[in-house]
Image (tube, rainbow, N blue to C red):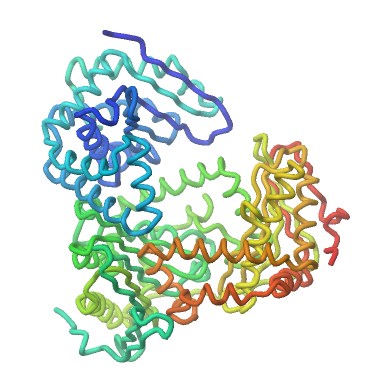
Amino acid sequence: AVSAPQCDVIHGPYQETRLQFTVPAPKLEDDESPAWDMFASILGQGDSSRLAHAVKDEAQLVTAIDSFLYTPRFPSGFSGFGFYGRSETTKKAILAAVAEIARLAKEGPAAAELQRVLTAAKAEKIYARESVEGLVRTVGNNLMTTARLEFSAQYLQKLQRVTTEDVRRCARGVCDSIRQGQVVVVAASNQEHSDNINTQELDSVLAECARMLESDTSEAGGSLKQSAFKTANQTSARNPAVSQTQVALDSKCTLNFNKRTTKRLPVASHVLVWRWGQHEEPEGKTGLNAFLAQMLTRGTTRQSYRTFVSELEEMGASVSAFSGRDLFGLRLDALSEVQPRALKMMMDCIARPALSGEEFDRVMRETLEVLVAQKDSPGSRMSRVSGPLLFGSHAYGRPALGTAESLQNITPDDLVNQWQRLLLTEKFVFSGAGDFNAEQTLDILGTELARIASRSASLASGLEPLKSPLPVPSRTIEPRVGFDVLEREQAHISLAVRGYTLSDSRRTALEVAGSVLGGMGGRLFMDLRDAQSLAYSVGCSQSPGLWGGSFSSYIGTAAGKSKQALAGLKHHLEKMATEPPSDEELSRAKNALIGAQSLDSQHHHYQASQLAMSDIYGLSFDNFLGFKDRVENVTAEAASAAVRDLLCSEGACVTIVGPQSTWVPEPNDPLLTGWNI
């Protein structure tokens, strides 16, 4: 039966339009449920999915898009797609997405698409066994949803039996729902965009989708052996399963290969990282490193972006690049059986990236849209205000993604030059955790990095040297205040001071102090949230760096309570500096830190990250293994002193994001003139 679609538009202070498009779907234990799962995954889950390729990458109609399937046990479920992007392209994006569904209904999926989903499901099942948390979650979900302990294993078996025709049948079911008006569309947009986004316009585009489906005219918008260059090995005194191989790639460049091998699960995680932070960005081109990180995985000279992501997803593997204040790197997670091939693909990203003009334009557009979307995020706005307050013109004070102005200064040639500078390092650090062949891995890795090292001299000759980085500004006792207007009901307040460097031994004591203050049982939560009802949320954290760090407390409160909330944060920082925690507080804080680290350590990707980061930061490669001992050795007085030393050396840095009516202190406000310690 034909019914009327349901459309609703929510207007608010949104920079981009967000939309959800849903149709009916079966419940969890229906026979066709696995086929619907396969359909949703092929349609819009992952970078190689149809919606990501056609609507986002090719047509460039949205910033991000994916599909979803919700199948509760009773009475029925729903499926659909969601995206966010520019308001003026919303209608075209809906039409393009529906056209992809129609194409899937007509042609069916390719065998490679079916295999990609099956491999991903297999990988998810294996990774779920990696930690106690994963096992408990799987068992709990099985019992809660179906009361059958083996449901997930049985479901995977059913998924393996799904055919091309089964997926086509699901796609045809979606098309039938659209033709019959069994559709619910909800959009969130700014009132300024109401000409483009309103219920009448959505009704109109759904009618056009139905006509399109009725007429069936849908169109889619030489090897180096390790024995030749291995130089030294050492094994961790803390854990004999953790070791390091130091390699001389040539007379100037070295590789540290840190590893922790285990046969517990057939998975492997790797990180390749080197010292290369925001200091190395040319003047006026803030965000260049983050831009380069995105571009490195957008295809290589051997594979197009589409082919690259398709092969990774078919293998159930992932490769990503990242940049930080002090480092740059690539990350790989893969099943053991495909680890050698996935590792070669990761090395292609750094040794022979495509850096194509077409992908440059796409990444530029996507990054600019992310910057727009960040305007809706209080956390992002706070970070952009507090960075310059804490670090002045130093690189740490700049936003990692850059600004709209700095991105406009970046050219394709800048990317090529920055990539070449990146390869001029004197030290690579590579880590591995899990089940992998260490000798084979070192052979693949060493061969590629030795070739890179041999080209360093020729690369350097054509590059203009970068200016020396600005020093970290001296600490100041003068208070600093920053305010950014965001018309929401809540005010977000941060009270911070500069923290310790990564090499400072007081960093662990400060982490314990932060745990005493933060967390569900911390002083901030118990007093400001529970006792005084000042907070929606509270927290305390430190962020160390090579050149300096930050130590900050946070509270989310009603705008009318901002003065009391800030006074509460200041009171507790001062109290922490003058009153060491009780035995009970200290024990809770330590247990929270050690417990969190123990849970994280179950995951191979965490182990690989720690093996790499500890080394590149100038600490021992097995430094993370001593975390528990360092925490347990912190005394109550040491935790208090770590905070007191910071407060005695620097004035308060206050950042507030909230509505215009929020109370904001002047720098000379009595509340901020000195610490009461």
Between 440 and 321, the residue placed more toward the observer is 440
Q: Nearer the viewer, residue 339 or 422?
A: 339
Apparent side of residue 310 relative to residue 164 in the rendered image (left or right) = right
* Image position of 162 (left or right of 309): left
Query: Quarter-wise, where is residue 634 in the image?
Result: bottom right
Q: Picture coordinates of residue 219 (x, y %)?
A: 20, 28
On the image, the x and y values in percent for residue 512 come to 63, 67
- Picture layout, residue 367 above or below residue 67: below
- Residue situated in front as seen by the camera: 142 or 650: 142
Q: How many marks?
A: 0
Q: Residue at x 32, y 16 (%)?
A: 182
Extreme-right residue of the structure? 670
Q: Residue 472 versus residue 126: which sits nearer the camera?
A: 126
**x, y percent for residue 33:** 23, 31
Residue 637 location in percent, x, y?
73, 74
Residue 133 in sight from this viewpoint:
yes
The quadrant holding residue 153 is: top left
Determine if residue 289 is in view.
no
Residue at (33, 75) in percent of width and height: 260
- 6 in relation to 452, above or below: above
Q: Dividing the image into 4 quarters, which one contains the C terminus? A: bottom right
Quadrant of the snapshot with the N terminus: top left
506 sits left or right of 201 in the view: right
Q: Would residue 131 be found to the left or right of residue 193 on screen?
A: left
